[in-house]
Amino acid sequence: MLRNTYRDLRTAVIAFVAFSVLLGLAYPYAITGVAQVVFHRQANGSLITRGGQAVGSALVGQNFSAPQYFHPRPSAAGADGYDATASGGSNLGPSSKALATRVAESVARVRQEDGLAPGAKVPVDAVTASGSGLDPHISPAYAALQVARVARARSVAPGEVQRLVGQYTDGSTFGVLGEPRVNVLELNLALDRAFGAAP
Amino acid sequence: MTVTVSGVVQIVLYFAVVLALTKPLGAYMQMVFEGRGRFAGRVFSPVERIIYRVFFVDDTAEMDWKRYAFSLLIFSALSMFAVYAILRAQGHLPLNPQGFPGASPHLAFNTAASFTTNTNWQSYAGESTMSYLSQMLALTVQNFLSAAVGIVVVIVLIRGFVRRTTTDLGNFWVDLTRAILWVLLPMSLVLALILVSQGVIQNFHGYTQLTTLEGAKQVLAMGPAASQVAIKQLGTNGGGFFNANSATPFENPTPFSNFIEAAAILLIPAGLTYTFGKMVGDTRQGWAIFAAMSVLFLAGAFFTYGAEQAGNPTLARLGVDQSYHTGQQASAGGNLEGKEVRFGIADSSIWAVATTDASNGSVNSMLDSYTPLGGLIPLFNMELGEVVFGGVGSGLYGMLVFAIISVFIAGLMIGRTPEYLGKKIGPKEMKLAAIYFLITSSMMLLLTAVAVSVRQGRAGPLNAGAHGFTEILYAFSSAAGNNGSAFAGLNANTSFYDTSLGISMLVARFLPIVAILALAGSLARKKKVPETAATLPTNSALFVGFLVGVVIIVGGLTFFPALALGPIAEHFLVHAGVLS
């Protein structure tokens, strides 16, 4: 009995050390090695560069407030939103007064920015914060709402802006998975390419 | 309740994939643990022989339940001390490009308890607390080890049913090695690489600084995420690399990555039902358990999905359009606070239900912001004991305990001595089954009662009113259920919550495990009773229905009062327009 106890203790220590090296070092390093060679871009954050400078990640949302850009969803990540070192949602519950107040403000802001009639319905993604606070996407409905403002700020025809929105709209994956969406950063970069960066 | 075709199709497709993989994976696991056929002999055995020599293990020497439990407990204790030590010493260890300091004693204790119990409750935000070394050597390792421990315990329980008049239940070190080397590691290798292809990051860089189009500074958190995310999903762990877990784009960037991460949650627990059927020599026994789990999964998924897609009545009153649209002006609609556009309502709801049916604490949307009824299902799932597929291993042994309770109740109704799989269920087995259920449910309810009674507990919730109570109830249900998912508004990184949640995780993990091993020991010593015409068949549709009923009634009777004070009260308040 005591002999077994001693044996199991010895095995526990050896097994723990061996599995730690295998699973905590060898495994992640092996995945990193393969990933850095085969999926170099993805493994390092799917960065987008412009003029040799990284301006963002294709997967991570960032703040836009200028009228010539499409705006993302509200964000609860960090103090100013879209802080990619402090991912998170608002965690406000459905019966929260703070949530109702924040949404009411966002509804008013969207209506004013995009020249909607008072009482006009606003798409839900335009006034709700995502879970990560880093949502890179908006719905095609919210993008459509912003076309007129962006076109006016850039002095181009709304049809041309709408065409770019169409180009940067992804449908459901394989026609089934997920929801249709527009990548805000990629769309705004395309606008800058098509119509100039600083109108 | 609102449903769309797209949502229904996604739920059905998800379930179909899990169903399709159950048999092949289950048969494979049976071969890994029991069937030493030609393939296992040629591929597995030579590698294992070397390992057992290094470990000083005689793989032919089997253990009784006490020695098995002892080995399991010292191995887990060692794990816990190692995680605690690494987190405390983090500031002096390598692979820490952001220079994070060591964790506080209560956070290190909570996290060590959390990851060694397969809970993965997180009182910290990964990207601002944990060095890469801590993520790998402390947390990723425990993602594997705690999952393997869960798997071997259910294998032992099944052996208890299969074997007769013996005390031999297998060798802990052999079972552990096989679970890691032949099940968890190969699946993780494949899944991690698929995830990287989708955009989950895997590097050792310092955080990337860049200037956005509008000239602001943005810092992107980096790290070896994919290798951890893979096992976090497969091992029903759930501890995110980043604070927002699988809502974070770098952890779950696309609908496709989301689909396979979600499938990975239920894969092994579902497969184990087939392993069980195969080991007991009647695969219909396994499918009966699978069917009962499926009924509860599908009911929960459609309920939560319907509640979330219907949206939040408060937002509707403010002029927000929450209906589902397709075409040029497509919109996911529904209650989108805390959810990502790329996932919408259906993918978020599937995830919320699958993770809490299992004991996977990961989230791809913030549960705290769910509608009261949408969030009730994840909470209730955990309170049922996470037996709907459940944690790897732990879900199945929990459901087998419910099966024992079911044959006992059925036996009382028809006046026969209860038996299950040829083993008589006596007073000892019933006592162990009752202990198993009472430990977790009492930890959930009693500690919630303590927390709402003391100042330190009441300081935790972010939200006021009934929702604040739900945040506390959810935390203790999650900890004692070894789930790890959270109504994340609760500020849990305080000495009160870190300590009380940490203790409840440890108690509710290891006492039930000892009860299960004792149950296996007691069953294995029994003779097999021959099947007669009066034996209650446990592989029939009737038994499946009876089992589902027992799970819901036992869980419902235990938790209904607490649920009435939380989500049910909040549901009526929200619809009456009462905010707090």
Image (tube, helix red, strand yellow):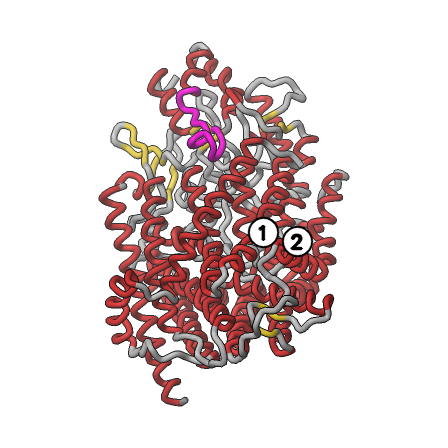
Measured along the vertical axis of the image, is residue A75 above or below residue B27? Answer: above
| Residue B572 shown left or right of residue B165 in the figure | right
Q: Magenta stretch? A: A166-180
Quadrant of the image for the C terminus of chain A?
top left
Q: Amino acid at mark 2?
A: Thr
Residue at the spot 70% in from the left edge and 64% down from the top edge: B453
Residue at 31%, 75% (x, y): give it: A14
Q: Rate crowding at label 1 as few (under 14), some (14 to 19) or many (20 or more) other CA atoms within 10 Å.
A: many
Question: Which quadrant of the rendered structure holds the N terminus of chain A?
Answer: bottom left
Q: Is residue A179 magenta?
A: yes
Q: Where residue A64 sits in the image (x, y, percent)? A: 45, 29
Residue B487: mark = 1
Q: Main secondary structure of the magenta part?
A: loop
Q: Is residue B425 above or below residue B288?
A: below
Outermost residue on the right side: it is B576
**Between B172 and B331, which is closer to the camera in this rendering?**
B172
In contact (CB < 8 Å): disc 1 and disc 2: yes
Chain letter belonging to callout 1:
B
